Each structure stands twice: as structure tokens, then as C-alpha cells.
Image (spheres, rainbow, N blue to C red):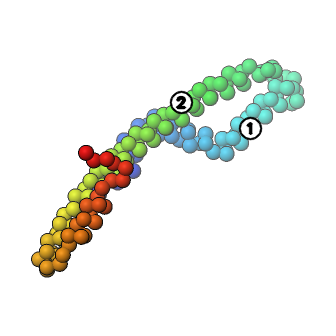
Amino acid sequence: MAINANKEIKTLRSAENKAADKITNFAGTMKFVYLHSFWFGAWIIINLGFLGAGLKFDEFPFGLLTLIVSLEAIFLSTFVMISQNKQASTSEIRSELDYQTDVKAEKEIDVIMKTIQRIAENQGVKVDDLLLELQEARKLPGVNKK
């Protein structure tokens, strides 16, 4: 039975990583932009006194708003870095699985080629020129072998 790498990786994620991914995914949407545009606009309108002086709670230059936005930026950048680190480790796992699959496929192809060569030899078919082509195909471009 083949292993589904994506399912295996998802099972390894902690609750914190799942939360960080959800926050990062939301922060990367237009809903996030619209929400913040509305929030900033409402904050500024209220605190400039357009809705009445009694509603003001953060006088210009909006020190409380600046503090909140700065803290949000710190947390959002941390969540983004957590998600990026998880994506990097996921990518490493997938690379390793790809490599293992490639090695296994190469071994299987080698067995198949040897089988075909034996069949051809038993049937009296000349395969020397094909073997030379196969050896050339196996050479990696840009790799100098000593």
C-alpha cells in the first residue's frame, strides 16, 4: 500500500502549527484587507470626533492604534515565519520521498532492461548498439566523472 505523504504530513502538524497556518491563510486574503480598512477607517472617524466628542478614546496621532497595529504586525510576521518553516520541512520530506521513489524506479528499470537484454540475446537479436545508447542516456549532463 502506498503512503500518501500529504496525509502523513498533516497528521504530524501540531495544534499550534495548524492555528498559525489558519491565521496566515486568513491574513493573506482580501477579507483581511477589507476588515482592516473598515477597522482603521472607523477608528479614525471616531477618534477625530466626527461621531461626537464623547466617543473619542484615542486622540490624534492615535497612539493606541499605533500600538495595536505594531503588535499585530509582530504576531503576523511570526505566524508567517512559523508557516514558512513548516512548509520548508514539508518540502524536505517530499524531496526525500521523491528521491526514494526515483531510486526504486531506477532499480526496477535496470531489472527490466537486463531482462529485455537477456530475452534479446536468447532470440539472437544484436543489442550492442542499444546498450551503448543506454549507457549514454544514463550519463548525467553537467557531471564530470573521474
Q: Would residue 33 be found to the left or right of residue 89 on screen?
A: right
Regarding residue 103, the answer to whether it shows in the image is yes
* Residue at image point 28% right, 66% down: 133
Q: Which mark is residue 104?
A: none
Q: Nearer the viewer, residue 141 or 33?
A: 141
Q: Would residue 50 be found to the left or right of residue 34 on screen?
A: right
Quadrant location of the N terminus in the rendered image = bottom left
Q: Nearer the viewer, residue 117 or 98?
A: 117
Q: Would residue 34 be found to the left or right of residue 142 on screen?
A: right
Q: What's the amino acid at mark 1?
A: Ser
Figure check: 24 above or below 118? above
Q: Residue furthest left?
A: 122
Which quadrant holds residue 58?
top right
* Residue at image point 21% right, 62% down: 110
Q: Which mark is residue 37?
A: 1
Q: Earlier in the sequence, mark 2 or mark 1?
A: 1
**Mark 2 secondary-structure assignment:** helix
Q: Nearer the viewer, residue 25 or 90?
A: 90
In the rendering, at what x and y percent does residue 101 appear? 30, 54
* Residue at image point 87% right, 23% down: 53
In the rendering, at what x and y percent does residue 138 appear? 29, 58
In the rendering, at what x and y percent does residue 121 appear? 13, 74
Quadrant location of the C terminus in the rendered image = top left
Figure check: 115 above or below 137? below
**Mark 1 secondary-structure assignment:** helix
* Residue at image point 36% right, 47% down: 95
| Residue located beneath label 2 in the image | 78
Which quadrant holds residue 2?
bottom left
Mark 2: give few (<14), some (14-19) or many (20+) Cα within 10 Å.
some
Between the C-alphas of marks 2 and 1, the distance is 22 Å
Regarding residue 108, the answer to whether it shows in the image is no
